[in-house]
Image (spheres, rainbow, N blue to C red):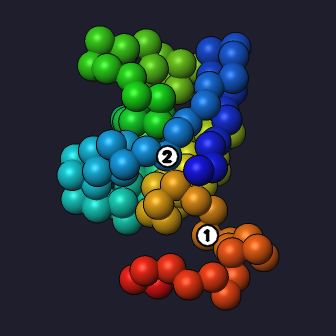
Amino acid sequence: MDEIEIQLGGSVVTLRPTLGAAMGMSKRHGGLMNVLAGLERYDLAMAADVVSAGTGAGADQRQAIEEKVFAAGLAGLVSPLVRFVILLSNGGRSPEEPEEAKGVERPFA
């Protein structure tokens, strides 16, 4: 499983593409394409939601995450957050299939 690291609040934060993060984002926003569209619009609330989902943060941490996302600025965050949502849409993996996995039979592939 791939992970994305971002700078937030003066420290490195790791976003983990879990099933819970993917399902939560998909249910809350009507699909991951809507999440990508929100990030493309530089939607601050969407960016904070992606960070919350990727870190597994609870509702009690939401305001702190929003403040850190705002302080970091969306210009530097949107690209890694989009990459993270793409990981979510691909089962936690980068869409580029590793060379050693090519030609390996997988169920439902």
The answer, for residue 39, to whether it is visible in the render is yes
Tell me which residue sits at (33%, 43%) in the image: 20
User: Does the residue at mark 1 contact the one at mark 2 (Cβ under 8 Å)?
Assistant: no
- The residue nearer to you, when weighing 84 against 2, is 2
| Distance Cα–Cα, label 1 vs label 2 | 13 Å
The answer, for residue 46, to whether it is visible in the render is no
Tell me which residue sits at (45%, 20%) in the image: 65
Residue 97 position, x and y percent, is 68, 73
- The residue nearer to you, when weighing 53 against 30, is 53
Tell me which residue sits at (47%, 60%) in the image: 91
Callout 2 amino acid: Pro
Residue 104 position, x and y percent, is 63, 82
Local packing at callout 2 (Cα closer than 10 Å; few below 14, some 14-19, many 20+) is many
Total marks drawn?
2
Mark sitting earlier along the chain (1/2): 2
Residue 73 position, x and y percent, is 61, 31
Q: Relative to residue 58, is residue 78 drawn left or right?
A: right
Q: Relative to residue 58, is residue 105 drawn left or right?
A: right
Residue 44 position, x and y percent, is 43, 36
Q: Considering the numbered disc 1 on the image, is that residue within a helix, a strand or a loop?
A: loop
Callout 1 amino acid: Pro
Q: Is residue 8 above or below residue 85?
A: above
Q: Relative to residue 62, is residue 85 drawn left or right?
A: right
Which mark is drawn over residue 79? none
Residue that badge 1 annotates: 95
Q: Is residue 95 above or below residue 58?
A: below
Local packing at callout 1 (Cα closer than 10 Å; few below 14, some 14-19, many 20+) is few
Q: Is residue 62 above or below residue 98?
A: above
Q: Is residue 81 above or below residue 96?
A: above
Q: Considering the numbered disc 2 on the image, is that residue within a helix, a strand or a loop?
A: loop
Tell me which residue sits at (29%, 51%) in the image: 23
Residue that badge 2 annotates: 17
